Amino acid sequence: MNKSKLIQLLQVFSKSELRELGRFLTNPAFNVRQETIPLLEILVKTGLSGKAWPSKEQVFSAVFPKLAYDDHRLRLAMSALLTSAEKYLVVTDFLQDSPAFQSRLSKVLRSRNRHEASGQALNAGAASLSAQTLRHAEYHLERYRFEEEQFRMLLEGPEAAQGQPQMLSDQLDTAVLALKLRQACSLWAYQSRYNVPCDFHSVEALLPLAALHLHTPAVALYYHCFRAMTTPGDTRHFLTFKQELLAQGALFPPEELRDLFILANNFCTRRYNEGDHSFLPDHLDLYRIGFDRNYFLSEGILSRFTYLNAATIGLVMQEYTWTEKLIREQQAFLEPAFRESVYAFNLARLEYQQKNYGPALQLLQRAEYKETMMALAAKTIQLKIYFETEEFDLLESHLQAIAAYIRRKKVIGYQRENYLNLVYFVRKMLEINPLDKKQKQQLRETIRQTRPLAEKEWLLER
């Protein structure tokens, strides 16, 4: 029972929503299968309330007490309840969107020649839309729909010649530009991460038009974001993007604002990885503000990657007090499956950076790392500690363990070569005569020219 689509859907309902669904089922406009009512009752009383799930026979007996068990009939009842539950979700969501409801009502009334009532519904919806604080792409699209409905009503009336088609056209331009640029930024980020090619010719063709709509935050923000990502050499676009983001953030819903901050941080990360450290203050600034305003939470969960990246920037900038506060306070928002390991890893990095090697080793050894790359990163910190504390016997054993781990886990791609090269050069540093300047210089040049190579800067410093 608990693997059925019906059960999986009902499990995301709150208690109050389940009660409302029960009342929803009594309305014949939405549900004509009366057996769905006792079916919901038995499911709520048993499995959905935390008790053991009943068998199909028990459910059938509760729903059809006078009939012999019929699996097909039970499946039909479950399918009907699933459909009604889906209707409930859509209807309640739609009714909560007052502008959309009034817009649809206006169209329906106009189609039935109730023009006065249609106009009233349209005015009410437009007023409700204007009263909202959000000014994201969906706002402009909804506003276009109101403008279009207003224009249609005008065409059907005696004052058709007084219409303003340019206003309608301009509003559609704004909506399309906001949607297209937002999508382009998301696709560019996806392409950069997964190396999946996308065609941006249509977006590039729209950029001159978008440049004329920079007074609109939903266009300006994504225009400068896209230009920053596609022309990283021109840093003016990123600085304007950041400025607009901090100034206009309240005009966007939380989920979109989170995505915007991630896009901004991704730009800084890319520049840092390319050797440009000039954006580190901006990067840290974005993380500070984002965490202070809870922008990085999605349904109460903080991505472990955002947690790791923010701590990395804090450590690079040597903002140890802020970094420790971040690590400790944000731990509770991590996914439970990764919480302990990611928390211990971040805290170990902080201790290592401050040369507290004993506490760092204890933290690294107490956590179980489920992800290969996280495990390799933790082993790398251990490697560095053993080298810097001159625990060379432990270091040699650890180097063997890393190489064996890479072979056992079948680490693929450039990461395999990345870490094997690290092991190789640490061994070379152990073997080299520290008084032989020529050997040291040759090894230094070899390290510089080797790619890929983890911890290259650390190796060169040593």
Image: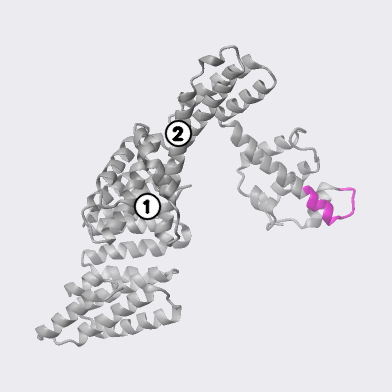
> What span is colored magenta in the figure?
65-77
**Residue at figure coordinates x 13%, y 80% from the top left:** 441
The residue closer to the viewer here, 292 or 205, is 205
Q: Is residue 293 visible?
A: no
Which tag is nearer the camera, tag 2 or tag 1? 2
x and y percent of residue 425 in the render?
Answer: 25, 81
Q: Foreground: 7 or 62? A: 7
Residue 165 vertical placement versus 96 (above, below): above
User: Which of the 4 quarters of the picture holds residue 423?
Assistant: bottom left
Q: Name the amino acid type tagged 1.
A: Gln
At 20% from the left edge and 75% from the top edge, which residue is drawn?
388
* Marking on residue 330: 1
Residue 430, position as x, y percentages in the image: 21, 85
**Colour style of the rendered protein structure:** one colour
Is 385 drawn above or below residue 194 in the view shown?
A: below
Q: Is residue 219 visible?
A: yes
Q: CA distance from mark 2 to mark 1?
A: 41 Å
Tell me the quadrant of the picture where the N terminus can be found.
bottom right
Q: Nearer the viewer, residue 302 or 135?
A: 135
